[in-house]
Amino acid sequence: MAGRIEYVGHATVFVDLDGVRLLTDPLLRNRVAHLRRSTPVAARALRGVDAVLVSHAHYDHLDLPSLEKLGKKIPVVVPRGLGGLLRKRKFESVLEVEVGETLAIGELRIRAVRAEHDRGRGPFGASADPVGYVVSGTKSIYFAGDTDLFEEMRELGPVDVGLIPIWGWGPGLGGGHLDPARAAEAVALLRPRLVIPIHWGTYFPIHLGLAGRPAFVSVPPIEFATALREKAADTRVEVLRPGEGLELD
């Protein structure tokens, strides 16, 4: 059965595989606090979603207003410890998972896997161990969420498609993130047939865009593709800008 992947923006990816439509880490607002979106959210990103996969507690990945745009009946999968945030907002179908657990959504198997990232949601907010997800059907797709490099990534591959973060929303990166060079090292461990870089080119601080779009909005995938030629030359890379997609053959 045909599939499709669309890069909605930041860590939000629309995955249509084997008749099941998933949305990862929905961030569907054109303005988030001091951040401005480089391109508007496509309306189709809100339609026909069967379930949501959330990787961790940070506000740019677990965004309650964005989830509410999808409706409170939609199943939402979150790391164990974050379900209470959604139940307090009257979400009706919240599934909490830990690393190693697998669940079924339609014809797909969804496995929660390790991620190396901060677990908190601010100094007094909820916390949970972050996860990535391996989605398995007629194709296998690894969504990394937010993570730093770790050697055990080798055990997650090979996969058909890797959705790998390569940057963020500012001119620099804090700990627990992959930059283009380290993202290429992650690809070498994972051995995907196809890699799509995510977590880049979508949001930037408003004050940094007053004189035009900042370079860090567009440069990371160029640097990633260059690093990939050295680290994992056999892996095909498809750079999708926010709103662009491709068919999985």
Image (cartoon, grey):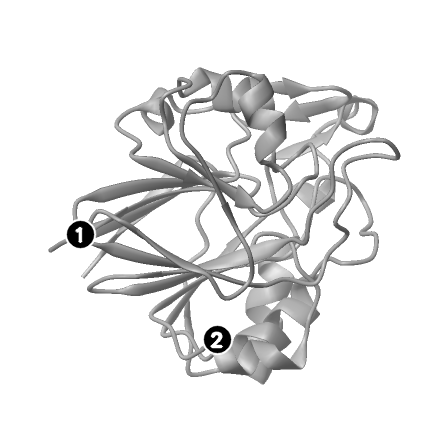
Comparing 47 with 53, the one in front is: 53
What crowding class fits label 2: few (fewer than 14 Cα within 10 Å), some (14-19), or many (20 or more)?
Answer: some
SS at circle 1: loop
How far from the left and from the top, in percent, is residue 197?
52, 56
Instruction: Give yes or no for contact between labels 1 and 2 (Cβ–Cβ under 8 Å).
Output: no
* Residue lying furthest left: 1
Comparing 87 with 182, the one in front is: 87
Comparing 29 with 237, the one in front is: 29
Quarter of the picture holding the C terminus: bottom left
How far from the left and from the top, in percent, is residue 108?
26, 55
The residue under label 1 is 18
Find residue 141 and report its image quarter. bottom left
Q: Amino acid at mark 2?
A: Leu
Q: Is residue 97 left or right of residue 33?
A: left
The circle on residue 120 is none
Q: Amino acid at mark 1?
A: Asp
The answer, for residue 29, to whether it is visible in the render is no
- C-alpha span from label 1 to label 2: 21 Å
Comparing 100 with 31, the one in front is: 100
The answer, for residue 23, to whether it is visible in the render is yes
Instruction: Check the image and report above or below for 83 versus 218.
Output: above
Quarter of the picture holding the N terminus: bottom left
Q: How many callouts does the rendering have?
A: 2
How far from the left and from the top, in percent, is residue 173?
80, 52
Q: Residue at x 68, y 75 (%)?
A: 150
The residue under label 2 is 156
Instruction: Check the image and report above or below for 123 versus 36.
Output: below
SS at circle 2: helix
Q: Residue at x 55, y 30 (%)?
A: 27
The disc, 1 or 2, on the residue closer to the chain's N-terminal end is 1
